[in-house]
Image (tube, helix red, strand yellow):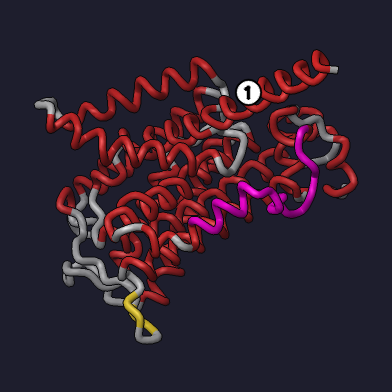
Amino acid sequence: MSLAHDAPRLAVRPATLAQRPARAWPEVNHPAAWAVAAILLIMPLIASGFFLIEIFASTLILGTIALSLMFLAGYGGMVSLMQLTIAGFSAYMVAVFGVSGNANISLGWPWWLAVPMALALATAFGTLGGALAVRTEGIYTIMITLAIGAAFYYFTNQNWAIFNGHTGINTVATPHFWGVNWRADIPFYYIVLAVAALCYFAVEYLARAPFGLALQGVRDNPRRMAALGFNVNAHRVAAYAFASFVAALAGVLQVWNYRQISPGSVSVGACIDVLIIAVVGGITRPIGPFIGALIFVLLRTFALDFLVRIGLDGNRFRLLIGLGFLAIVFWSSDGVIGLWQRWRQRRGADHSSGGRSHG
């Protein structure tokens, strides 16, 4: 049975496709989209090295990890808390197969061999975890993926032969080719931007492709989709495979950014942070995770310093994040994007009513 033939008959949520045209590529002619793209492209000209890497590059990396969660939750109805674990697994594999300061652990492969191996293993790891998770629904899916994340954290923390225990792997080598140090601030920023843009447009494309439409049909009515001849579990596992690859790409960038990887990077709290990022930004649109990541990074960077200056524990910045999370979820089920849409609708309604009154 053809996916393309049955896709138009699928019942999908109004918040996802009914309000947007079913095009293969997203609409990019909106002035705001062009303005954001232009600002991101010229960012190295207007931002210092600190803002370029610690704010914007970190936002794009975290946003890409949260994007993989958004794809699963928004289009597949599957909330996965192991996306950061997959990114961390990929980062560890880059350090293990590549070159690092821990010569007794790292195999010393060149980056162009270590990175594809890391991506393949991390994608396989996430797909296997997804194959286990799709056999459950609701809270049980969340618990299975969280258990995978917790197990990986404790395993890396206690394993010294491969992961170097709680110390982690330090001084991970970064690419040098064509006479360029690609970990220098400006080249690295553009690598991160290119990967984030590629993942963003890939998610947008899949959302409108036959596979994405079928996945949303599986999300809304799996019994009907099974009756139409679709393999429900196969679509869900394929979604996990794609989301795992996206998270793995971000993991490679993450280990290049910090030049080290340790169990703290894949802790349970960090896994939950990715969920918060996706929900705060908006779980139904690919741009949402990047908005949530920007808010998270700004709070993590500046709220921590502010709390320390007034004599409070810097770790309390998570309290501010939690309060913001509760406020946004209370006022909007679709995060910041939902608040923006409601504001635009009210503004449009006010203009319409004003125009009618004037007439």
81 on left or right of 319 = right
Q: Residue at x 86, y 17 (%)?
A: 359
Residue 38 in view, yes or no: yes
Amino acid at circle 1 = Arg
Q: Label 1 neighbourhood size at 10 Å, few (<14), some (14-19), many (20+)?
A: few
Q: Residue reaching furthest front?
A: 358
Q: Residue at x 52, y 45 (%)?
A: 67
User: Residue 172's spot in the image, x, y percent?
Assistant: 25, 67
Give the secondary structure at mark 1.
helix
82 on left or right of 138 = left
> Toward the viewer: 38 or 225?
38
Residue 135 in view, yes or no: no
> Toward the viewer: 85 or 36?
36
Q: Which residue is mark 1?
A: 342
Say whether residue 20 is magenta.
yes
Q: Could you say which quadrant of the image residue 348 lies in?
A: top right
User: Residue 33's spot in the image, x, y percent?
Assistant: 61, 50
Q: Residue at x 32, y 77 (%)?
A: 181
Q: Residue at x 37, y 66 (%)?
A: 188
In the image, residue 176 above or below residue 156: below
Say whether residue 324 is magenta.
no
Q: Residue reaching furthest left?
A: 311
In the image, residue 137 above or below residue 215: above
336 on left or right of 29 = left
Q: Could you say which quadrant of the image residue 72 lies in?
A: top right
Residue interval drawn in magenta: 19-39
